[in-house]
Amino acid sequence: MARLEGQVAIVTGAGSGIGRASALLFAAEGARIVHCDVAPEPTKETQRLLERQGAESVGLTADVSREDTASELVRLALERFGKLTILMNNAGTGTNALTAELPLAEWDRVHNVNLRAQFMLIKAALPAMIKAGGGSIVNVASVMAEATDYGLAAYCSSKAAVAGLTRTVALEYGRYGIRANYIMPGPIYTGMTRANFDKDEIRKVWEKKTALKRLGQPEDMARVALFLASSDAGYVTGAGIRADGGLLLRT
């Protein structure tokens, strides 16, 4: 039996990278999918790929940092598929500037996408999950929730906050059969990182930093997300899984 048979999942940032790989894998494991991306063409392409798999799915082009996006995604799940049992908060963004030089608008933009959007969607999804008798929330953080680097004040603080938010939701809603966990990806080759990792000198540095001596692929993260979304992780909640190829094993 498929591991997500009978489940209904929302996946944000599904137009490429980790989000698309997760939406496709969730669908292959039996889930019906509501997916979202900020750009129309990537959303359409993800929908085409899901339809090619024979998946029941619907896509929405929307900015997750807008308050109405959360309610619209939950509404779509309930209207099309009758319930909501899985939420994967994957959409994210970044910036790079030393703290004293970081514009407030950039700080707000990063936190609105990486943190505020996750909170809004969790808040909108919880009543539906309670009604369904339980569910799984999978939030995408980053190894930078535990580490840092120059120019990453906004990014690191937003991802550390995702970890804190996830643990609190796990504590508050475990009594309803709702689990909440987060993934901490390391150097993953995605649409957001491709411009840097396509440069040999940058890619080789990051490959060397990992114990496995390679960049991660979106499918690597999708498999972690599948584990957390499925009953295989039925006694796992409030946990963060570091999926970084061993990046942080040494300083």
Image (tube, rainbow, N blue to C red):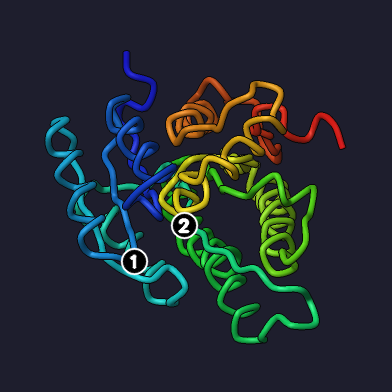
Count all numbered tags in the image, as a single digit.
2
**In this image, 109 relative to 91: left or right?**
right
Residue 104's place in the image compared with 168, above or below, is below
The crowding category of the residue bearing disc 1, from other C-alpha atoms within 10 Å (few below 14, some 14 to 19, many at least 20), is: some
| Residue placed most toward the observer, 105 or 102 | 102
Q: Which residue is mark 2?
A: 91
- The x and y percentages for residue 150 are 77, 62
Please say if 193 is above or below 92. Answer: above
Q: Secondary structure at mark 1?
A: loop
Residue at 51% across, 34% down: 221
Q: Say which quadrant the C terminus sits in.
A: top right
Q: Residues within 10 Å of mark 2 (few under 14, many from 20)?
A: many
- Identify the residue position indicated by label 1 in the image: 38
- Asked whether disc 2 touches disc 1, contact meaning CB atoms under 8 Å apart, the reply is yes
In this view, the residue farthest toward the bottom is 104
Q: Earlier in the sequence, mark 2 or mark 1?
A: 1
